[in-house]
Image (cartoon, rainbow, N blue to C red):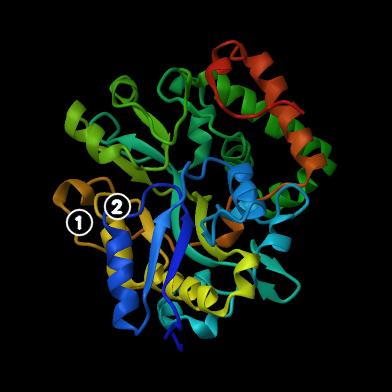
Amino acid sequence: MGSALAAPVQLKLLEWGYLPTGYEQQFAEYARSRGGEATVSRVEPLITDFDSVYRALRTRSADVVMPTSYFYKAHHQPLFKLLLPIDVGRLEHYKEVKPALKNTEYDKQGERNYSVPFSYAMFSLAYDSKQEPNPPTSWQVLADPVRKGQFAVFCDQFEPLLFSVLLSLGKSPALFASGEMLADNPLQLEVERQLTRRLEASRGFWFNQVNRCEDLRHQRLATTWGLELVECNRQNGQQWRIAMVREGAIYALDALSIARHVESDPDRLKAAYLLIDFLLSAPLQSRMLVGTPTVSGSNMGARPPLTPEEQAVLPERALPEFDERLLVPALPAHIKNRYKRMVQQALASSGKESPSRVCPWDLAN
């Protein structure tokens, strides 16, 4: 790409806070090596939710943003009006992006994609192999009354809970994203029954993206994004490991997009593409992934060497390839509200309504 800039550019990046320390200086050096004087500063406060991204774009306080995949089509899809379609021909490192992450649907409007995938994590089932010599093979284990008190329910958002219950019944993930399961009354009733049984069996709730190690000390099973497992094994003397359930894990993906207002300034637009290209590079992503064996970068070459402790939390088989069908979807409001009511009813039926009040999930219609 032609990256020479007519004048120095200062970019503003809105991100989640997990980029490696020093990336700002590394980007300046990266830009200079390609003939441009460009720097980046982190917008604060960081991303917390859809509104934080929408607000930054509306006020032009960010040039490049890092939305989670389901933000793009949430709330009647207003982000598309505030973002530019991505021209992958301007990205040197796009050829290194994993094939499964190309031509995605989550960010597509018409025939254009409005992002480049950056990183993704799996919402998985984990087990303490010191207490559970045989790994669980299905999400369905969490609805077994024998498992009462052995795990907690994730409640930053309700979608992974309900989605994994549907998957545990061997049903297509498409039925969740489309809301078609609501048109199948026997299936809806079975989902409600399994959801209630899972809540009844749970010991409580966890949130803020990670299980607390002191809680995992009292569990044999866990639902997890995997971020805490290495540290909790170290603290607790346990051996938590990701289970490969036959229905598949659930994915969350963060992506990179350019604000529409940048289009009016050719140098700023060049610099924005240069920043995205830097963030897609294998060296940057490898630094970002250090210490997080259950998180994956979009670059095929991004994989730092694992310590024995990090390798120990992974299953014996390689982690599965990304599958967009298992991505937490953006739900239309009428479907989302029906799902919220299902969760509310199950909380009441299971006796978990009061304990769930600690949860940050939004179940209000």
Residue 113, image x, y percentages: 64, 71
- In the figure, residue 343 lies in which quadrant? top right
Which residue is rendered at x = 64% and y = 64% of the image? 107
Residue 353, image x, y percentages: 62, 14
Residue 210, image x, y percentages: 39, 34
Q: Is residue 291 left or right of residue 83?
A: left
Which residue is rendered at x = 31% and y = 57% of the image? 288
Query: Decide: marks 1, 2 in contact (CB < 8 A)?
Result: yes
Q: Residue beneath label 2, please?
A: 293
Looking at the image, residue 95 lies above or below residue 361: below
Q: Secondary structure at mark 2?
A: loop
Which is nearer the N-term, disc 1 or disc 2? 2
Circle 2 Cα neighbour tier, 10 Å, few/some/many (<14 / 14–19 / ≥20): many
Camera-side residue of 35 and 74 = 35
Q: Residue beneath label 1, please?
A: 306
Which label sits on residue 111? Answer: none
Q: Amino acid at mark 1?
A: Leu
